[in-house]
Each structure stands twice: as structure tokens, then as C-alpha cells.
């Protein structure tokens, strides 16, 4: 576990872009609109700007990291009606490639990088519109289905992400119904009176090729299929990552107090891997390993320890502090509030049997690595 003094890294959680065992890549802000893409080397504690020129973005700045490159916008001379450039910056060499140039009124935002070829951009000029840009053909097409860029209609939350299954790219969405839009959706006929009001979750999926083709053809409604649908208050869908080239989800049904684990092979093939009846483990609390989808159950509590059972292997752990997340079947992560009301992070290394506590700190998982930004390590 590498300990990095956060005072040497001028970035907050929204600026961390990518992490490797030797470096942290981040956006170094100069002011509200100007920034560099930078690297912090852990061994020599040195900071290097990958961009030679200052980048500018006057709207919501969203750099994305895909396959060793940072994608971001660079607005120049906006007050004079200047251009907006779409850039791809190589993380290793720092070489910058200009992928597109626009000269549009209002503001452009890079909303989503699907892959190295397709980008979703928002254009805000009194109204909000979106378009798909094809880096290869240098063409763009308006996106009519507002779900794809965050206007969620009868859903409160849409979590889109791109996955590759059997060498085919898919867009997957975890969608949750919004109780405040329920009656509007009833009137419009989007849902029926039998649909639950809140917390119902669905798993939507479509191949990237299909979505791109439909956008290019001007389709008003993209053909996402409902692969999985839960129909009760408190039911949830949990994304558990990819295993062996397959996508794995769990679906919890509150009425049955039961969780079913699914493997997804393509947009029409879903296989049940197993199920857990949580009533067999009362009293319980549980969390997931971020990498291996391991279920951990707090099986017993006392003032001195929590007994934690790994449901996949049957192994048991005695852990003094509670925890919210587990990384790599090894690091137990716990956030709390210290005596001075500052946030604290505790990391218990189950392999080394060592505990690290950080003051005025928060953590995140970036590129599969644990990153803790802290003012002070207590012990």
C-alpha cells in the first residue's frame, strides 16, 4: 500500500483521472476555467504537466480516460466566438491529438466517451441538445432520445456504461423509476398502473453498433431491451463487474429477502449463477468486493469485533471496525467522522494484518486502485 501525502497533490476527487502503481494522473486547475493534464510520480514525489499549453473549458469540464488516453475539450478565445477543440492526450508520451474543431455559440460539454471512435457531446445555447461525433468519419448526428444524455423522463437515475462481451460492445444501463415522474408517465402511457412507484430497477442493454446505426438514421427512440426488471419497493440491481468476459449483476428482492446472481452473455442471454436467502443469515449486513463480487456478511457483532464471513469461500474474519466496501478481497474500507468533525478513513489490510487510519480524508476507487486523499495519517 502506497502512502501519498495529499498536500503534494493539488487535486480533489473530481480531478483524479487515472491511477497506476507508480503514478497518479490528474487535472491540475489553474483557475475556474484553465487547467493542465498532469502526472504525479509516487516514487520521486514529482509533478509533471503532460500538456505544454494551458487548456480552457468554460462549462462543466469532464476529462475521460480510455485505453491510455485522456479525452477533453479545449475552448480558445470564447469571448471572441472562438473555437472548441476535442483533444486526445496520450498518458505516456503527453502527445496531444486534435480530433475535432467546432465553432458554435453557447457551450459545449464532452458528456460521454463511448470508445476511441464515438463521443457524445452536449450543446447548450438557450436549449440543450446532444450529438454523436464519429472520430473516424468526422461526422456528427443529433441524438433525439434524451435518455442517452441524462434527461431521464420517468427514471430518477440512469447509469450507462460500455462493456465488451464476446468481442462485441454493448451499452448497459441500470435505470431506476422516479416517484415524482410516476403520474406524468402514467398519463403519457410510458408505464402502466401496475408499475411500481419507486425504487423499481431495470437493466437495459443494447449493442453499440445498433445504437450508433439508429442515431445515424435519426431514430427518436433507441431500442434498448429490458434484460432484467424488478417490480417492488426496495428491490435493487447491483453491478458486480466483469468476470471471464461476462457481465455479472445481482438482483435483490425485498419481499423475498432473496438475492439472485446473474451472468449476462449478450443482449438476449442471461444465466442465473446462484441465489442467497438472506433470512438464513440473520442478523446480517453485507457488502461486495469490487473486483471478485465476493459477498461479505457481518455475522456477529460485539464491542470488540465484528465477525465477517466470506460467503464465497466460507472464510471468517474478526474485524474491529465496521466497513462499507472491500477491495480485492483484502482491503476493508470504513469512513467515519473524527472527534473534530473531520472525515476519517480506516483501511484494514487483511493480508498484512495492518490498520491505516487517515484524518481529514476521503477515498475513491480509480482504475481499480484505491486512492486516499488525506491531510494526516494517524497510525
Image (cartoon, rainbow, N blue to C red):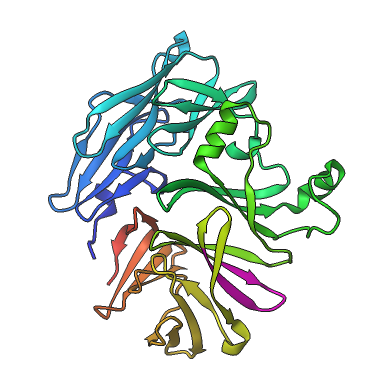
Question: In which quadrant is the C terminus drawn?
Answer: bottom left
Q: Looking at this view, name the residue that lies furthest to the left.
A: 44
Indicate the position of residue 13 as horizontal and vertical percent values: 40, 49
Image: 334 above or below 129: below
User: Can residue 337 be spotted in the picture?
Assistant: no
- 312 to the left or right of 148: left
Residue 97: in magenta span:
no
- Residue 145 versus residue 17: which sits nearer the camera? 145
- 201 to the left or right of 107: right
- Residue 100 versus residue 57: which sits nearer the camera? 100
- 254 to the left or right of 8: right
Q: What residue sits 65% from the left and 30% below the top?
A: 219
Question: In which quadrant is the N terminus drawn?
Answer: bottom left
Indicate the position of residue 230 as horizontal and vertical percent values: 69, 63
- 235 to the left or right of 52: right
For residue 123, which quarter of the picture?
top right
Magenta stretch? 250-263
Q: What residue sits 54% from the left and 14% below the top?
A: 105
Q: What residue sits 79% from the left and 45% below the top?
A: 190
Image: 300 above or below 370: below
Q: What residue sits 22% from the left and 29% below the top?
A: 95
Amino acid at each position: 500500500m502506497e502512502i501519498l501525502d495529499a498536500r503534494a497533490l493539488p487535486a480533489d476527487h473530481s480531478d483524479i483521472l487515472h491511477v497506476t502503481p507508480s503514478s497518479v494522473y490528474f487535472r491540475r486547475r489553474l483557475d475556474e476555467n484553465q487547467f493542465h493534464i498532469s502526472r504525479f510520480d509516487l516514487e520521486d514525489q514529482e509533478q509533471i504537466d503532460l500538456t505544454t499549453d494551458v487548456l480552457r473549458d468554460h462549462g462543466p469540464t469532464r476529462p475521460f480516460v480510455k485505453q491510455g488516453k485522456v479525452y477533453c475539450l479545449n475552448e480558445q478565445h470564447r469571448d471572441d466566438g472562438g473555437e472548441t477543440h476535442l483533444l486526445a492526450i496520450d498518458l505516456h508520451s503527453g502527445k496531444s491529438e486534435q480530433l475535432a474543431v467546432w465553432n458554435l455559440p453557447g457551450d459545449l460539454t464532452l458528456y460521454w466517451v463511448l470508445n476511441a471512435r464515438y463521443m457524445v457531446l452536449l450543446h447548450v445555447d438557450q436549449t440543450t441538445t446532444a450529438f454523436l461525433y464519429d472520430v473516424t468519419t468526422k461526422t456528427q448526428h443529433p441524438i433525439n432520445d434524451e435518455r442517452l444524455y441524462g434527461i431521464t423522463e420517468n427514471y430518477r437515475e440512469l447509469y450507462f456504461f460500455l462493456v465488451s462481451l464476446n468481442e462485441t460492445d454493448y451499452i448497459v444501463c441500470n435505470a431506476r423509476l422516479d416517484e415524482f415522474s410516476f403520474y406524468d408517465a402514467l398519463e403519457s402511457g410510458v408505464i402502466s398502473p401496475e408499475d411500481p412507484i419507486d425504487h423499481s430497477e431495470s437493466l437495459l442493454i443494447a449493442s453499440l453498433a445498433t445504437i450508433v446505426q439508429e442515431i445515424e438514421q435519426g431514430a427518436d427512440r433507441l431500442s434498448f431491451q429490458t434484460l432484467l426488471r424488478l417490480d417492488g419497493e426496495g428491490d435493487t440491481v447491483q453491478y458486480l463487474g466483469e468476470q471471464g468476459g461476462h457481465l455479472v449483476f445481482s438482483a435483490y428482492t425485498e419481499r423475498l429477502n432473496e438475492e439472485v446472481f446473474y451472468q449476462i452473455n449478450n443482449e438476449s442471454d442471461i444465466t442465473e449463477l446462484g441465489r442467497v436467502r438472506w433470512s438464513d443469515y440473520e442478523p446480517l449486513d453485507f457488502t461486495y468486493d469490487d473486483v471478485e463480487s465476493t459477498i461479505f456478511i457481518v455475522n456477529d457483532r460485539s464491542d470488540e469485533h465484528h465477525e465477517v464471513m466470506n460467503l464465497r469461500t466460507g472464510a471468517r474474519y474478526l474485524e474491529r471496525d465496521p466497513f462499507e466496501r472491500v477491495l480485492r478481497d483484502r482491503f476493508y474500507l470504513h469512513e467515519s467522522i473524527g472527534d473534530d468533525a473531520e472525515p476519517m478513513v480506516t483501511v484494514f489490510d487483511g493480508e498484512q494484518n495492518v490498520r491505516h487510519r487517515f484524518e481529514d480524508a476521503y477515498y475513491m476507487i480509480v482504475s481499480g486502485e484505491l486512492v486516499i486523499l488525506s491531510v494526516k495519517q494517524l497510525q
